[in-house]
Image (cartoon, rainbow, N blue to C red):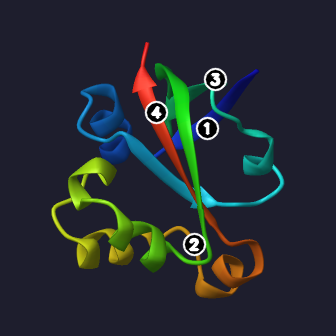
Amino acid sequence: MQHEMRLAKEPFEKIQNGTKIIESRLFDDKRKLINPGDFILFRQSGDASQEVKTKVIAIFRYDSFNDLMTEFQPLLFGGSSTKELLAEIRRFYPEDEEKKYGVVGIKIVRI
């Protein structure tokens, strides 16, 4: 199965150049459909012509972004510290949604 997701320019570029291999999202209805072996086509927000195709190699479920991001090295998320990553994720996802859905780390490889 193939899924599509949009990303802001900076995280998109990190996936494109291979420095980000775990994408973190809410575990909402859309993300519940993603399984290892599926494909994700990432498109850059603001420039949909920019895209990168990836394959899902693992799914990591956690109750919170803090739990997810302290389990793995920050570099896997394209960051330099857990604190920085958590501050960045708060720009996109409020805590009430995090508590409602839980979170998922989607480990990917470019294809």
Q: Which mark is residue 37?
A: 3
Q: Which mark is residue 5?
A: 1
Which amino acid type corresponds to the residue marked 2 in the rendered image? Tyr
Give the image location of residue 64, x and y in percent. Answer: 55, 77
Work out which residue is located at the far right of the displayed protein and give it.
29
Q: Is residue 100 above or below residue 18?
A: below
Which of the two labelled residues, at mark 1 and mark 3, occupies the earlier sequence position?
1
What's the distance in space between the residues labelled 3 and 2, CA to CA?
Answer: 26 Å
**Quadrant position of the C terminus in the picture:** top left
Q: Say few, some or many: other residues with alpha carbon within 10 Å of mark 1 (under 14 / 14 to 19 / 20 or more).
A: few
SS category of the residue bearing label 1 = strand
Query: Which residue has dot 2 on it?
Result: 93
Mark 1 against mark 3, which lies toward the viewer? 3
What's the distance in space between the residues labelled 2 and 1, CA to CA?
Answer: 15 Å
Query: Which residue has dot 4 on it?
Result: 108
| Closer to the camera in the image, 15 or 56 | 56
Q: Is residue 100 above or below residue 107?
A: below
Residue under the point 25% across and 60% down: 74
